Amino acid sequence: MRLLIKNIRTLAGILPAETLCLRGKEMASARSIDGAYLVADDGIITRFGPMDEMGEVVADEVVDAEGRVVFPAFCDSHSHIVYAGSREGEFRDKIAGMTYEEVAARGGGILNSADRLAEASEEELFEAAERRAWRMIRTGAATLEIKSGYGLTTESELKMLRVIGRLQKALPATIKATFLGAHAVGRAYKGRQSDYVDYVCNEMIPAVAEQGVAEFVDVFCDRGFFTPEETAKILECGKRYGLRPKIHANELASSGGVQVGIEYGALSVDHLEEATEQDVRDLAASNTIPTVLPGASFFSNLPFAPARMMIDAGLPVAIASDCNPGSSPSGNMKMLWSLACIKMRLSPEEALSGLTINGAAALGLSADRGAISVGRRADLVVSKPVPSLAYLPYSFGEELVEHTIIGGKIV
């Protein structure tokens, strides 16, 4: 099947095919073409350029993008969209002044979601998560990472991962599954955190590996959750079973999570609201990708991760949604684009790189998506008519995605 998109106002996010991520100043370097066309054959980009060089193209589907911007579809490398119920009661508590840690300490937060998930059927979880995923797809996401972590028992964690597996089969988006049994200490292990860590390592991880339901292992390494030593034990165990490390780090404090993530070869360290200059220096000397989550900072009234400092230090910053019921209940990547520009002081081009090529890199997928290049997947967004690329994050409350294209097909 051949897709032709013609009369594009601006084709943005153009990179060499060999580029796997953009570091520092490179994040503003992706090219664009005004007055462009793009051709995809069988889901792969095969040609693009100025309209006056298009010539005659016979296509099965033609999109006239006059007045519209076309750019790579978003790659959301951090989400938690399999969950039961909602937590607007805690939203009220936070408005009244309670902190994330205070909510968790009284048995709310993640444990609240774990209670509800244990009661929900697999079918109920699947139907709710499928609706959330479609909202994300329709607002421009073509690649999603989804974590477990609201189970906190072997049975419930596997239930979540089976739901993610069903989403992988049911949806047009590419979906990666992450095991996050170490999201919090399950209620049955209250006061016995070291025993819970042993449970994760000795029972959960072997079961996850045996069933082949996850690609990554993650740990919430932060103040009040898991220590660097406990995190190292879990990551090492996960690696023995073929699970590649990712990590939550420095959301609430400079916890040492960045350093343990780097030590164990984590593909990414995520959150980083409390990242220090030393954390940034350590990341600059590694191959681990820092992933910032501006939606969590906005919704939970946390500091915004120092993405500007990271980029100025030469890091390849990724931007993801953290979509979850407690601290970031939105998967709208266009809104994150606005937050990254407004609150983190990134240019529209830098933020788009974080949402696309670097998001794909944070999942090990950037060789074939996340940019406009010949040979990459035709995962694309066609905007509604807009005056420029910068108008998309500028108009933060306006829904401006007209089409999401995945593998060369409008979905």
Image (tube, rainbow, N blue to C red):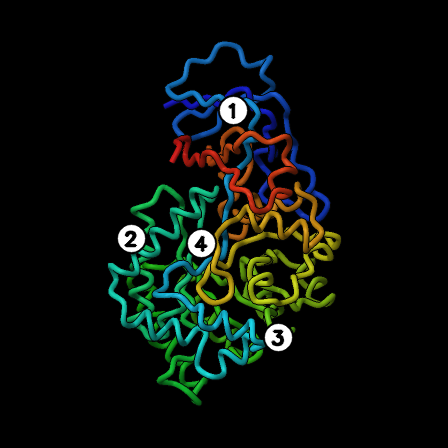
Q: Closest to the observer: 369 or 188?
A: 188
What is the residue that sits farthest to the top in this orientation? Answer: 56
What is the residue that sits farthest to the bottom in this orientation? Answer: 191
Q: CA distance from mark 3 to mark 4?
A: 24 Å
Q: How many marks?
A: 4
Check disc 4 and report the residue beneath it. 145
Check disc 1: other Cα within 10 Å, few if <14, some if 14-19, many if 20+.
many
Determine whether the residue tagged by mark 1 lies in a helix, strand or loop.
loop
> Quick check: 257 left or right of 42?
right
What residue do we see at 44% from left, 78% from top?
A: 108
Mark 2 or mark 4: which comes first in sequence? 4
Q: CA distance from mark 2 to mark 1?
A: 34 Å
Check disc 2 and report the residue beneath it. 166
Write down the quadrant of residue 10 in the picture.
Answer: top right
Mark 2 or mark 1: which comes first in sequence? 1
Check disc 1 and report the residue beneath it. 65
Q: Quadrant of the N terminus?
A: top left
Nearer mark to the viewer, of 3 and 1? 1
Check disc 3: other Cα within 10 Å, few if <14, some if 14-19, many if 20+.
many
Q: CA distance from mark 2 to mark 4?
A: 14 Å
Q: Are marks 2 and 1 in contact (CB under 8 Å)?
A: no
Q: Mark 2: which amino acid?
A: Arg
> Quick check: 370 left or right of 162?
right
What residue do we see at 41% from left, 17% from top?
A: 59
Determine whether the residue tagged by mark 4 lies in a helix, strand or loop.
strand
Q: Mark 1: which amino acid?
A: Ala
Mark 3 or mark 1: which comes first in sequence? 1
Q: Position of residue 327 (x, y in %)?
A: 51, 66
Is residue 197 at least partly visible in the picture?
A: no
Q: CA distance from mark 4 to mark 1?
A: 29 Å
Q: Position of residue 291 (x, y in %)?
A: 58, 57
Check disc 3 and report the residue beneath it. 255
